[in-house]
Image (cartoon, helix red, strand yellow):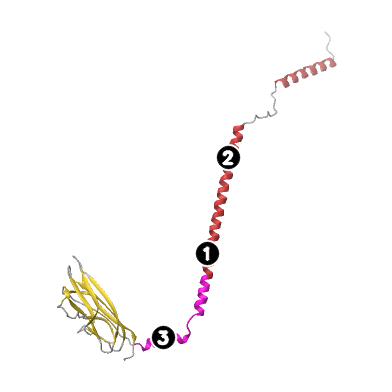
Amino acid sequence: MMQPSHTVLSTFVMVVSSLLMSSAHSRLPDLAPKPQPYNAWVAGSNNCTCVRELTQLKKELQEESQQRQELKGALETYVSELYELRAMVRSLKNSTPPAEKYSKLRSLAKALPAVSFNAKLSYNRELKPLDTVVFDTVITNNGEAYNAETGKFTAPVPGTYVFYATILSGYNTKVETAIIINDKEVARMYSGAHDAHGSGSNAAIVNLKNGDSVWVRLLYQGGNHVHGYYSTFSGAIMTEQQEQ
């Protein structure tokens, strides 16, 4: 038997290889990307998300702008108030009284006599009409013008004085009293309460001459019980006057 020649064998191999490659290409899938169809719903969803984000961003920017405007307004107010305070300080500095006025005021204060007192009742008292309420416990008595034994204040110098009295009634009773100057009534106090103690107070500013007397008296109306500890009497000179 004759052997095929080398040329015939090579040709056969080439034909077989070509057929195999053609068959493989026919079975391989198409790897190129295929265009996707347009999806209107997906595109609309993306657009809605962008619109919401833009709207939120716009809202935040508006809020920040408003806050800045408010801060600016507050800062302008503070600056305006600061300028006003500076103007007030300058005005006060320019209107400060001279040292001579202070010296005169100090001289007047030194010349004014130290006349003042404060006394209280240390026990309960049953009085008759027109009796003097004697405040027996002295707390202050500058000038020694108040007498704790008689309950009367005597003006040591002429001037304008102020007096103040507080009277506490007994339980479930009433009592009426008055501040008296030289037997003349100048201020009344009503004290009383239902099922309790009642407190009454009054004050008087009067001009007194040297030797005038001031005290607290029980009146005819009402009861006669004056409760201690809470009942007080006080007075002081305000300005001194020349005797006429």
Q: In the image, is residue 12 above or below residue 80?
A: above
> How far apart are the alpha carbons under marks 3 and 1?
40 Å
Residue 175 placed where, x, y %? 19, 73
Q: Which residues are magenta?
A: 84-112
Residue 126 relative to residue 14: left or right = left
Give the numbered dot on residue 49.
2
* Residue 209, picture quadrant: bottom left
Q: Is residue 188 left or right of residue 101?
A: left
Expressed as whole percent of the image width and height from the top left, the position of residue 156 reads 28, 89
Amino acid type at image mark 2: Thr
The reply to whether callout 1 and callout 2 are in contact (CB within 8 Å) is: no
Q: Main secondary structure of the magenta part?
A: helix
Q: Please, is residue 157 above or below residue 84 in the view?
A: below
> Is 92 colored magenta in this rendering?
yes
Q: Nearer the viewer, residue 152 or 20?
A: 152
The secondary element bearing badge 3 is classed as helix
Mark 1, residue position: 77
Task: Assess disc 1: are there few (<14), some (14-19) or many (≥20) residues with their C-alpha within 10 Å of its C-alpha.
Answer: few
Q: Secondary structure at mark 1?
A: helix
Q: Check residue 105 in the rendering and tell me which mark sits there, or answer none.
A: 3
